[in-house]
Image (cartoon, rainbow, N blue to C red):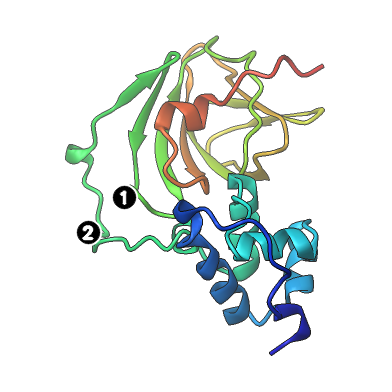
Amino acid sequence: MNASDAAPAPGPAPDDGLSAVAPQLRSLRRRAGLTLEAAARAAGLSPAHLSRLETGHRQPSLPMLLALARIYGTTVSELLGETVADRDAIVRAADMEPTRAGGWTYVQAGAPGRGMQALRVRVPYGSQGDIVRVHPGEEWLYVLTGRLRLRLGDTAHLLGPGDSAHFDSLTPHRLAAEDHDGVELLFVHTLLQSPTATLCLGAPTGELP
């Protein structure tokens, strides 16, 4: 056993609701062949903080879970110890009902409960173009029709059909249709089990300069 895996000093009793998560965090770290110090450094945490997560004395936030899942080569679902029932790998267009929020139209393009959420998104002209989104995870989008104005941080990009973008969603980003006919996208996000509208609409944080 590594010295870093020795039992920590006694502390507050773990919360029963976290007891199932903590062993998974330690087990998956060891499966990845990482010491406590190496995993903590890669996740931007202190070894003491990660140790408290692994013993159930601290509750991991979603950004922490996303970071650890990437480092351990797994999904947030596995970190949480969730057992997912067998699902059909095929998604039929006839089974997908569109969802509308904020003027945008979303159609699920993947099975629910996966580590990635896939959507087909229709963005009308002039809708939500002033909303800046900042949230955990990674985002990938592919322009099917129309032109998309994508702002990442301080840089603006114009994407046409066949163009794609892949970025960290903690980078402030803004999406808008460039043309009056709107734009249609394929959209994939790594944030597990987010409501469709919340995931795409994001939380308004003001306008980028």
Instruction: State the quadrant of the C terminus.
Output: top right
Q: Nearer the viewer, residue 47 or 172?
A: 47
Q: Position of residue 23 (x, y in %)?
A: 52, 70
Q: Position of residue 108 (x, y in %)?
A: 33, 39
Residue contact at pointers 2 and 1, CB within 8 angstroms: yes
Compared to residue 138, the image places residue 36 above or below, namely below
Q: Position of residue 73 (x, y in %)?
A: 58, 69
Q: Which residue is pictured at 43% across the width and 26% down the height? A: 197
Q: Nearer the viewer, residue 90 or 181?
A: 90
Indicate the secondary structure of the residue bearing disc 1: loop
**Three-letter amino acid code of the residue under disc 1:** Ala
Q: Is residue 98 left or right of residue 22?
A: left
Residue 111 is tagged as 1
Instruction: State the quadrant of the N terminus.
Output: bottom right
Looking at the image, can residue 179 be seen? yes
**Three-letter amino acid code of the residue under disc 2:** Asp
Looking at the image, can residue 145 be seen? no
Residue 88 is tagged as 2
Distance of label 2 from label 1 (alpha carbons)? 8 Å
